[in-house]
Image (cartoon, grey):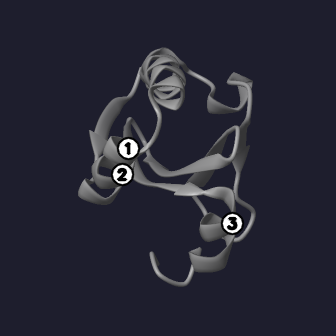
Amino acid sequence: MFNIKIHKNFIKSFEKIDDDYKNNIFDFLEKLKNTNDLLKINWVKKLSWSKGFYRFRIWDYRIWFFVNKDNIDILVLKSRWDFYKTFPKNYL
């Protein structure tokens, strides 16, 4: 089980997307909170360029999050194209 902290950047982006995406993101956050193994959640991938960073894929969007022991920081929600243009340079 993890403690989840959601950052302002994520909330701003979340408010702008369609409701269909929002329901799936709520489901993901619930799974994230209750899992013991992040990689068993579908579409979660550990990012190879940095320790503790992961991404979750939901259709054309990506959620970037950081794991530190029992804490997860949900950092950003971006479209796929913006996600790969701006990461990791803008958030490390």
Amino acid type of the residue that numbered disc 3 sits on in the rendered structure? Trp
Q: Earlier in the sequence, mark 2 or mark 3?
A: 2
> Helix or strand or loop: what does disc 3 sit on?
helix
Distance between the alpha carbons at the discs numbered 1 and 3: 16 Å
> Helix or strand or loop: what does disc 2 sit on?
helix
Determine contact: label 1, label 2, CB under 8 Å: yes
x, y percentage for residue 6? 29, 44
The mark lying in front, picked from 2 and 3, is 3
The quadrant in which residue 14 appears is: top left
Q: Say which residue label 1 marks.
A: 14
In the picture as drawn, the residue positioned furthest to the left comes out as: 8
x, y percentage for residue 42? 73, 26
Residue under the image location 60 percent in, 57 percent down? 79
Q: Say which residue label 3 marks.
A: 81
x, y percentage for residue 21? 53, 30
In the picture as drawn, the residue positioned furthest to the bottom comes out as: 89
Image height of 88 relative to 63, above or below = below
